[in-house]
Amino acid sequence: MNIKTVSKTFKNPLYLKSGRILEPYTLTYETYGNLNSNKSNVIVVCHALTGSHHAAGKYTPEERKSGWWDALIGPDKTIDTNKYFVICVNTLGSCFGSTGPMSQEYPSSKQYRLKFPVITISDMVKAQKILFNELEIYSVKAVIGGSMGGMQVLSFATEYPNFAEHYISLAATHATTPWTIAFNKIARESIIKDPKFNNGEYDQEDIKKNGFSGLATARMSGFISYLSPKSMQNKFSRKYVLQDGLYQLFGKYEVERYLDYNGNNFVSWFDPLSYLYITKAINIFDLSLGFDSLQDSLKRVSSSLHLISFKSDCLFFPKEMQEIKSAMDEIGKANLCTYLDVDSEYGHDSFLVETEKFNSYIQNILS
Amino acid sequence: MNIKTVSKTFKNPLYLKSGRILEPYTLTYETYGNLNSNKSNVIVVCHALTGSHHAAGKYTPEERKSGWWDALIGPDKTIDTNKYFVICVNTLGSCFGSTGPMSQEYPSSKQYRLKFPVITISDMVKAQKILFNELEIYSVKAVIGGSMGGMQVLSFATEYPNFAEHYISLAATHATTPWTIAFNKIARESIIKDPKFNNGEYDQEDIKKNGFSGLATARMSGFISYLSPKSMQNKFSRKYVLQDGLYQLFGKYEVERYLDYNGNNFVSWFDPLSYLYITKAINIFDLSLGFDSLQDSLKRVSSSLHLISFKSDCLFFPKEMQEIKSAMDEIGKANLCTYLDVDSEYGHDSFLVETEKFNSYIQNILS
């Protein structure tokens, strides 16, 4: 598969929802497949909180893991790269090449850190839209994404309603609930309260080398919300780490070892400030912001909106997607909206790991 | 109401499940009502993780809050103190007067701290049983409790099957699941990783005065698991703290303010090491430990066992109580077991706050 990774810097100011300005800013994105001559075969993929533009394939055959949605994107797969030109953009605020809190604040060479402006989902989408304009892509076949990616899709659908033929949002919500904000709260507290955070002036080298337990704990809080009681039971049950004693205060269950491993590992590949900024963007996401109601904001939708939720999702519950479907029905747009509630087991992560349960649904939409 | 608080020290060694010995040890307990002449009117109440022996009433009219199950226990209430003599014992490992990690390790005057032995639910129950023997109470009308209190009830029912006429367990499980262990993991990590923890040698005065953010975060993790998505939505929805800006990185939602307040407040009344030891006891609780199966352990039950779960409980799911009911049915003890699944909204905390939904059920059992 033809993978290209590109970084593009924009000199024009980006006006943010907060009233602040980002100037200049860089977007790093990845493409798969080939753009056809009339540019009518584009599919935009939006990533989640800790995701990146690397959505599919491997850069080298030696790479251990493929991109995060490789099960769905590739030659002859659901999002067929023999047919479609797929673009995935690293969101603003993230730490994989697009402008974020650890970027330099022009014209100084100092990093923004806590001076970085708060970014919204709407800002992330706006920046992507400017990139697509620059690439002279003015309309696309579909915009698709899960979790925070699904929020971006909803934002695209209401703010750029003529941009895509199909908007496909998975495992998302129209407005982040206090339940999810509470999980993010634990993560955010853990980061901020770690002395190594040092009011945002942490030593990047040091934390990558010696760890940063606050970010590790943050990741654990995320992990609980991404899994489900059932998937945890299936994966770990009550297995105890063999070499530990049951009556040792710090003896561990396998689930604890797993959280430790993934928490500590996370520090090597994700940035604490990006975690703060992106969870903030998720927390303040509310499709009805600036409108009288959710219904009112959805009145702007003019292409097909497809919603996919997962029965075992304990972060963004199916009910939240059903509310969008109901609102679309209420405002007389039932014909523009389809909804699938997937019989899943893997919790919120189902959109990443149970693709076989919804890929034909997406295939039908695209064909 | 006649409230008495008593501390009693035992000089005989207490042999723990771990093989270690506690000697001497103290139990602090509270009683309500009056013991009748033939000692046939006793009800034992077991408390949860952060609970105490103060289950009902107020010590003085000025006291702000009543005991934790005041809605259920008192004159003319479900557990009628005009009729019953109610005892609630602070569990071993806790920090309200019974022996715990901050107690002195006899004969030295040094506190145990991390040298304190791991305590099990079974140990907590054994110590209580020794106290009741000392009080010459050899059989009781009922043992009742919720959450970790419900685990104690199950332990009483299988280890001292002739002790009570009725065992009533609410919002508990027969074996703690990886889901719950994961919530506890975040709490435990937060405590241990806080530099103030200092390998258990924290300064009690200092943390009470200046805070201990690790314990505060631990409490937040607990809070999520005690509430439900719905109760959080009802309580907080997406309300934002008025004086905070939506685009301030550290601006807060009301749910975040609530978690902050309760987290920080918790440090003033609960001990970090007790939190570690009691969550350990909860994690390793498994009724089938030492038996071939849950069924096998339940074969010991010889009095009525009553199970109450709560539909909105996201910590100990109704399914876990249903498994006990099914196991009782399988081993031919259906006649000894009743089960109620309460249509609740307040998550795990329902056993504390929605007492009107199950008090008649308990009243029927007792009468």
Image (cartoon, coloured by chain):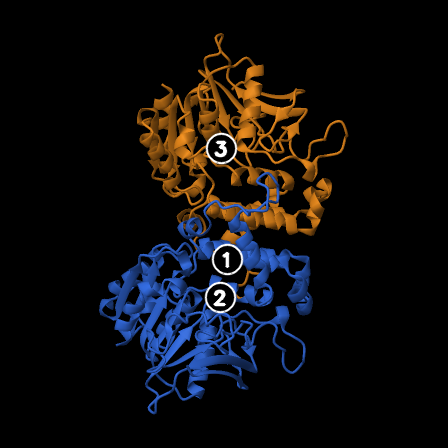
Chain colours: A orange, B blue
Residue at point 57%, 83% (across, down): B24
Quadrant for residue A76, please give it.
top left
For the residues labelled 3 and 2, the Cα–Cα distance comes to 44 Å
Q: Which residue is mark 3?
A: A290
CB-based contact (under 8 Å), mark 2 and mark 1: yes
Q: What x and y, as percent, mark residue A328?
A: 35, 30
- Measured Cα–Cα span from mark 2 to mark 1: 10 Å
Q: Nearer the viewer, mark 1 or mark 3?
A: 3
Quadrant assignment, res A276: top right
Within 10 Å of disc 1 (Cα), the crowding (few <14, some 14-19, many 20+) is: some
* Chain at tag 2: B
The reply to whether label 2 and label 1 mark residues of one chain is yes
Quarter of the rendering occupied by the C terminus of chain A: top left
Q: Is residue B74 above or below residue A177?
A: below
Q: Is residue B208 visible?
A: yes
Foreground residue among B230 and B337: B230
Residue projecting furthest to the bottom: B37
Kind of residue indicated by mark 1: Gly
B184 up-or-down from B302: above or below = above
- The amino acid on which the numbered mark 2 sits, given as a three-letter code, is Leu
The residue under label 2 is: B49
| Three-letter residue code for mark 3 | Gly
Q: Which residue is mark 1?
A: B222
- Local secondary structure at mark 2: loop
Which residue: 49% across, 23% down?
A44
Mark positioned earlier in the residue sequence (2 or 1): 2
- Horizontal and vertical percent for residue A340? 34, 33
The image position of residue A333, as x and y in percent, is: 33, 26
Q: Residue A43 at what x, y percent from top left?
A: 47, 20
